[in-house]
Amino acid sequence: MKPAEPRAAAASPELLQIGRRPEHPAHPAGGHPADDPGHLTILYRGPLSSCDYDCAYCPFAKRRDSPERLRADRAALERFTGWVAGRGHPVSVLFTPWGEGLVRSWYRRAMVELSHLPHVRRVAIQTNFSCRPDWLAEADLGTLALWVTYHPSQVTYERFMDRCRDLVGRGVRFSVGIVGLPEHLDHARRLRAGLPDGVYLWVNAAEGHLYTDAEAAVWTAIDPLFPYSRTPHRSAGRPCRTGDSVISVDGDGTVRRCHFVPAVLGNLYDGTFRRRARPCPLAVCDCHIGYVHLEPTGLYDVFAGGVLERIPSIL
């Protein structure tokens, strides 16, 4: 975790009001899941812990899961999608695997199946999108979205841009991101120049890296929302949607408020979980999939209609 320092000032109104992006209209379900008391957002992470990439900063780089673990992951995901299919209230799902999910057929199938369910408002996944894109033809692209990360050491710029152009051509909602390491700066600039204006390029502050104001300004020129990622957000005792309208679920159905608080709130499958608003118990929150739900950040307004896929409504 990055050292706890005061959070950088939010991006200025001028940076956030550059213009509304017609390429990514708000999802018909609305911009604020919290506005509907019956809606539940689930961050799902099963047993999968392997990846086809070899990034130096990732603990799961080139890790191989055993056949037994892969079978367990597949069974857990199928159980989860079955639960979602049988739910009577609106649901949104973000898959956040420890590794790369879309190289596995069961994640592609789950994305397609969930996208067609009338009560699923959004289904998204964090991915390097190294997989072939053909499966997207079967999905409902009004519901499916992708959170795509560019890893310059693992894929050529040309190949990655070809995939992005394919997604644009298919009409897929997606954001693209990169880790804000010094060696990634030129790659990020080239990527921003090559992507269509309607595709948001986000920059994640590198784990443990402290940015000077000058360094932060360089990254903010690429991603106007980088100030939200630059330093951890103070969160202790502050209202957060996790545990109530947003939960984390693992392969066994164990429910926690988010991926970063280990306390168990019950189980999704046995009926022991009960939604309840709870202030954050941690001192700070330094990961986007956590602090985006922290109410004082105001990020549900910034990402209205695109919270799970990290697509802002204005930029």
Image (tube, helix red, strand yellow):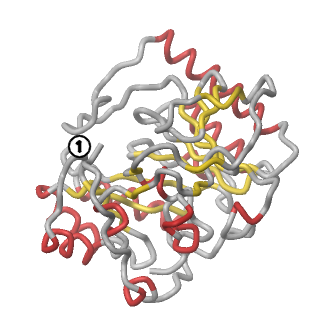
Residue 298 left/right relative to 27: left
| Residue 221 horizontal/vertical position (percent) | 25, 78
Residue type for callout 1: Gln
| Residue 51 horizontal/vertical position (percent) | 36, 31
Residue 228 appearing in the image = yes
Return the residue nearer the eye: 146 or 274. Answer: 274
- Examine the image and state in which quarter residue 185 appears: bottom left
- Examine the image and state in which quarter residue 11 appears: bottom left
Secondary structure of the residue carrying numbered label 1: loop
Return the residue nearer the eye: 102 or 236. Answer: 236
Residue 29 left/right relative to 151: right
Residue furthest to the top: 68
Residue 285 left/right relative to 257: left
Q: How many marks?
A: 1
Q: Is residue 129 above or below residue 49?
A: below
Residue at x 64% of width, y 20% of height? 75
Q: Residues within 10 Å of mark 1 (few under 14, many from 20)?
A: some
Residue at x 24% of width, y 51% of height? 206
Residue 184 left/right relative to 193: left
Residue furthest to the front: 237
| Residue 129 horizontal/vertical position (percent) | 42, 47
Residue at x 18% of width, y 46% of height? 153
- Examine the image and state in which quarter residue 162 appears: bottom left
Residue 92 appearing in the image = no
Q: Is residue 143 above or below residue 76?
A: below
Residue at x 13% of width, y 74% of height? 214
In the rendered view of the protein, which quadrant contains the C terminus? bottom left
Q: Is residue 181 above or below residue 69?
A: below
| Residue 293 horizontal/vertical position (percent) | 55, 57
Q: Which residue is mark 1?
A: 154
